[in-house]
């Protein structure tokens, strides 16, 4: 019904927020009952959105900010495996949250506390969208003279395809991107 009605965007958003819990509950019920079609669909969605690679030697690890520390933990582990000598962190203060510090600063501090030398880390701390993260991150790396002919991208599985697609708009076709969820 939502698509056949001429709703204002605010009403459509409210309807979506109202329907979301019911859709989640119904989907989980179908999965619990062993519904093979829903399981297959969920697997396909997860594999599509969360495409990933075996990471290889790279110039830099670029990690997208988040309220969870899981991404920076993964990044520091990759750094300690010596897959890259530099870490670039991007992420500002999301408009939907009140934070004292940008996500990039929180991640940088965590990485330093866990053994990454501060001189090996650079940040872009004003981004509020994936597009901002990518463009601002690449611009900052260029200003710093950091090569990025190969990069390990670290983000959540559900954001990987979007992050990778934005990155592909701006990097050379010869740039090697490794996707790590």
Image: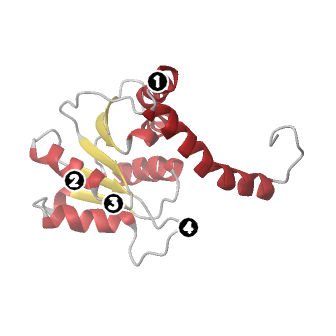
Q: Answer with mark 4 or mark 3, whichever residue precedes in sequence.
A: 4
Read off the residue under disc 1: 44
Evaluate if marks 1 and 3 touch, with contact meaning CB atoms under 8 Å apart. no
User: In the orientation shown, which residue stands out farthest toward the front?
Assistant: 33
Read off the residue under disc 3: 123
In this rendering, the label closer to the viewer, 1 or 3 = 1
Name the colour scheme. secondary structure
Looking at the rendering, in which quadrant would you find the N terminus? top right
- Which numbered circle lies on residue 127? none
Q: Answer with mark 2 or mark 3, whichever residue precedes in sequence.
A: 2
Q: Answer with mark 1 or mark 3, whichever residue precedes in sequence.
A: 1
Q: Is residue 135 left or right of residue 153?
A: right
Circle 3 residues within 10 Å: few <14, some 14–19, many ≥20: many
Secondary element at tag 4 = loop
Read off the residue under disc 2: 73
Read off the residue under disc 4: 95
Secondary element at tag 2 = helix
Q: In this view of the protein, can residue 49 be seen by the observer?
A: no
Q: Answer with mark 2 or mark 1, whichever residue precedes in sequence.
A: 1
Evaluate if marks 4 and 1 touch, with contact meaning CB atoms under 8 Å apart. no
Secondary element at tag 1 = helix
């Amino acid at each position: 019904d939502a698509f056949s009605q001429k709703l204002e965007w605010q009403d459509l958003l409210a309807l979506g927020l109202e329907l979301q819990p019911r859709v989640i509950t119904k989907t989980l019920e179908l999965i619990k009952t062993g519904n093979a079609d829903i399981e297959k669909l969920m697997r396909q969605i997860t594999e599509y959105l969360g495409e990933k690679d075996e990471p290889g030697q790279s110039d830099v690890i670029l990690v997208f900010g988040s309220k969870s520390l899981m991404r920076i933990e993964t990044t520091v582990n990759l750094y300690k495996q010596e897959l890259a000598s530099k870490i670039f962190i991007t992420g500002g203060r999301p408009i939907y949250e009140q934070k004292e510090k940008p996500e990039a600063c929180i991640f940088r501090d965590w990485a330093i506390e866990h053994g990454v030398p501060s001189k090996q880390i650079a940040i872009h701390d004003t981004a509020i969208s994936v597009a901002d993260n990518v463009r601002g991150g690449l611009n900052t790396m260029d200003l710093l003279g950091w090569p990025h002919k190969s990069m390990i991208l670290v983000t959540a599985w559900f954001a990987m395809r979007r992050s990778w697609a934005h990155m592909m708009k701006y990097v050379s076709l010869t740039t090697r991107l490794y996707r790590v969820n």
